């Protein structure tokens, strides 16, 4: 059971928009800690997509965006492309006894 | 170009030890903290450990604390993970990952470069 909750799967047609939620609590996202997002494609190294809630590293298309509010964060992907089909993970920090770096359970994006 | 290459994975019996290595290039290794993150088969990502750029600070996830030790050799641009008393639940792909900074504040950590991982299987 992950400390951060993500939907197991989302789907969307090419060209459409999807969002992936990441729900935490008052000891992590709600405490003000930043949320970061990663993309995992089979057979490749994981890739940083969003850091510091809403910042894109160089080379990440502006179709990817992040937001954060209260105890939750979201990743939005617009103009869906077949190559976006992958697993997506949110990450933050938790200040509770079992704290340190935490991940969401991951979301499988299927491009229909 | 930043590159991270893990090695040392394999099949090991429960209770035995294994040492993973991660050789890096393309950035000033001694200026960044380094992490190990793992992914069990069919599972999600789990953070394992962090070492600061100068080795003064080390942090571990609860599931490996007391069994795993992270270290680094800045002269060889390599980070290590010594895994002792291995359990079947340690079976996973182990990734090394570069921290965004010195790795002194784990609360501010995120991973801006990753290796492709090495598979560790703990089984009798």
Image (cartoon, rainbow, N blue to C red):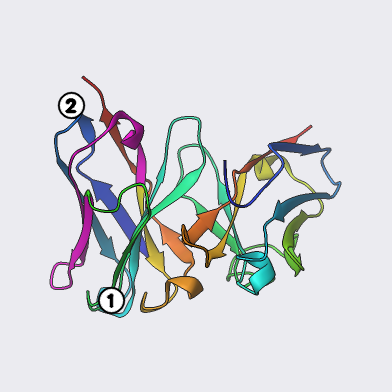
Residue at mark 2 to residue at mark 1: CA–CA distance = 32 Å
Foreground mark, 2 or 1?
A: 2
Q: Chain of mark 1?
A: B
Q: Which mark is residue B94?
A: none
Asked whether residue B1 appears in the rendered view, the answer is no
| Highlighted magenta segment, given as a residue range | B68-94
Q: Is residue A11 above or below residue A56?
A: above
- Determine the residue positioned at 57% across, 46% down: A2
Q: Position of residue B92 (x, y in %)?
A: 36, 36
Q: Position of residue B19 (x, y in %)?
A: 16, 46
- Determine the residue positioned at 23% across, 51% down: B68
Q: Are marks 2 and 1 on the same chain?
A: yes
Q: How many marks?
A: 2
Work out which residue is located at the far right of the displayed protein and give it.
Answer: A16
- Mark 2 and mark 1 lie on one chain; the one further toward the N terminus is 2
Q: Which mark is residue B13?
A: 2
Work out which residue is located at the far top of the displayed protein and give it.
Answer: B124
Work out which residue is located at the far front of the displayed protein and give it.
Answer: A97
Residue A112 located within the stretch drawn in magenta? no
Q: 10 Å neighbourhood of mark 2: few (<14), some, or many (≥20)?
A: some
Q: Chain of mark 2?
A: B
Residue B73 located within the stretch drawn in magenta? yes
Position of residue A15 in the picture relative to residue B60 (left or right): right
Position of residue B92 in the picture relative to residue A33 (left or right): left
- Picture quarter containing residue A61? bottom right
Q: 10 Å neighbourhood of mark 1: few (<14), some, or many (≥20)?
A: many
- Picture quarter containing residue A60? bottom right
Q: Position of residue A26 (x, y in %)?
A: 67, 65
Determine which residue is flagged by label 1. B53
């Amino acid at each position: 059971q992950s400390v951060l909750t993500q939907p197991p799967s989302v789907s969307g047609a090419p060209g459409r928009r999807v969002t992936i939620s990441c729900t935490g609590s008052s000891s992590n996202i709600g405490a003000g800690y930043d949320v970061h997002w990663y993309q995992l494609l089979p057979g490749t190294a994981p890739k940083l997509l969003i850091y510091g809630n809403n910042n894109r590293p160089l080379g990440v298309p502006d179709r990817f965006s992040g937001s954060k509010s209260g105890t939750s964060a979201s990743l939005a992907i617009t103009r869906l492309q077949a190559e976006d089909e992958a697993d997506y993970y949110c990450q933050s920090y938790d200040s509770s006894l079992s704290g340190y770096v935490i991940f969401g359970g991951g979301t499988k994006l299927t491009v229909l | 170009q930043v590159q991270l290459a893990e090695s040392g994975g394999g099949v090991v019996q429960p209770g035995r030890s294994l040492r993973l290595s991660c050789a890096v290039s393309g950035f000033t290794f001694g200026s960044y903290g380094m992490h190990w993150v793992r992914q069990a088969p069919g599972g999600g990502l789990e953070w394992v450990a962090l070492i600061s750029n100068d080795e003064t600070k080390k942090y571990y996830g609860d599931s490996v604390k007391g069994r795993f030790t992270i270290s680094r050799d800045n002269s060889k641009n390599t980070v290590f993970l010594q895994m002792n008393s291995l359990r079947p639940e340690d079976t996973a792909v182990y990734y090394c990952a570069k921290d965004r900074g010195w790795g002194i504040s784990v609360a501010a950590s995120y991973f801006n470069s990753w290796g492709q991982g090495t598979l560790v299987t703990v089984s009798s």
